[in-house]
Image: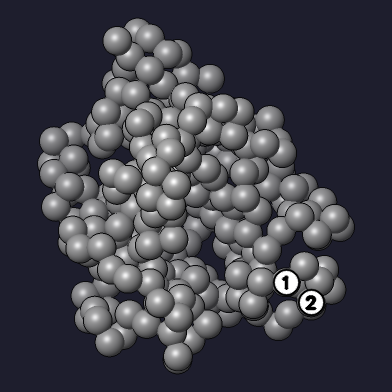
Amino acid sequence: MSETQGEKSQTTLTQDQINHFRQRGYLKVGKVLTDEEIEVYRREYDHEFERARQDGRFRNLAIDDTQDLQKKKEAPKQMLQIMQMCERNIHFRRLVYHDKILDMVEDLIGPNIQLFHDQALFKPARQGGAVFWHQDNGYWKCSPANLISCWLTLDEVDVSNGAMQVIPGSHLTPMLHEKSESTSALFDIESQVDTKTAVINELPAGGVMFHHCQTLHYTAPNSTDRQRRAFAIHFMPPGTKSMHSGAYLKVGFDRPMLRTRA
């Protein structure tokens, strides 16, 4: 786990990378995890999804929200989500404290870093469903809107199996998220944004990209013979509030402080 005090490691972002993130709302970094780490996280990821399929503790985002286990498991499209892997598995608990990742997060949001939450997002081979265009904070309603996400891949990802796509600069304009009449998403982007400007972030296994909580993003269906295992860690500075309640998002087991510096 990361030290709460002391010097950062040498794994930090350049000023050009920081400027890219601030201007465009995203940053593709590339491979961060070692091959040994990737193998451990793949094993634990698969184990947790197998357990979730047995006890129903997952969502299938490709269908309307339901508690019916058989419907979730047998739906023709599968976009599977497990929230808070760090509360289920010690290996993913350690991953949210990963020094190389936190060093880069520190460059983007400052030296005091709190976890908002994490989520595993699994697109099985041949039947992986899409995650439609959205801004995270359209749902989260956090204030100030300066959270960032680390999107981490455990498999090689490209456009055909569900790589992350983003609209550069979209983080500068928050948008209302209303029920779409044309898709199962909660946001009809086609009438508001030119998606032809989207950038596809292809990554190797163990790769990382960051995006702002207001960056419009999307992942396409996976119709390939390759699975796509992704893990997202959402970070925030301490002092972030919920716009719903006006309350501060307090430090606790579910939202630990990951790094603090004087």
Report the front residue among 139 and 13.
Answer: 139
Give the amino acid type for the residue marked by disc 2 in the picture.
Answer: Lys
Amino acid type at image mark 1: Thr
Task: Give SS at disc 1.
Answer: loop
Horizontal side of 104 relative to 136 (left or right) equals: left
Q: Percent x, y for residue 34?
A: 51, 35
Q: Looking at the picture, does residue 101 appear above or below residue 49?
A: above
Q: Are marks 1 and 2 in contact (CB under 8 Å)?
A: yes
Tell which of 29 and 74 is nearer to you.
74
Note whether 159 is above or below 103 in the view shown.
below
Kindly identify which residue carries mark 1. 66
Badge 1: few (under 14), some or many (20 or more) residues near its Cα, within 10 Å? few
Which quadrant: the C terminus?
top left
Q: CA distance from mark 1 to mark 2?
A: 8 Å
Residue 33 x/y as whole percent: 48, 37
Residue 96 screen position, x and y as percent: 52, 33
- For marks 1 and 2, the one nearer the N-term is 1
Q: Is residue 177 visible?
A: yes
Q: Is residue 76 above or below residue 242?
A: below
Look at 46% across and 76% down and name the residue there: 186
Q: Position of residue 251 (x, y in %)?
A: 50, 27
Circle 2: element type: helix
238 left or right of 169 in image: right
Question: Which residue bears the numbered disc 2?
Answer: 71
Q: Residue at x 59, y 34 (%)?
A: 254
- The answer to whether 4 is drawn above or below residue 81 in the figure is above
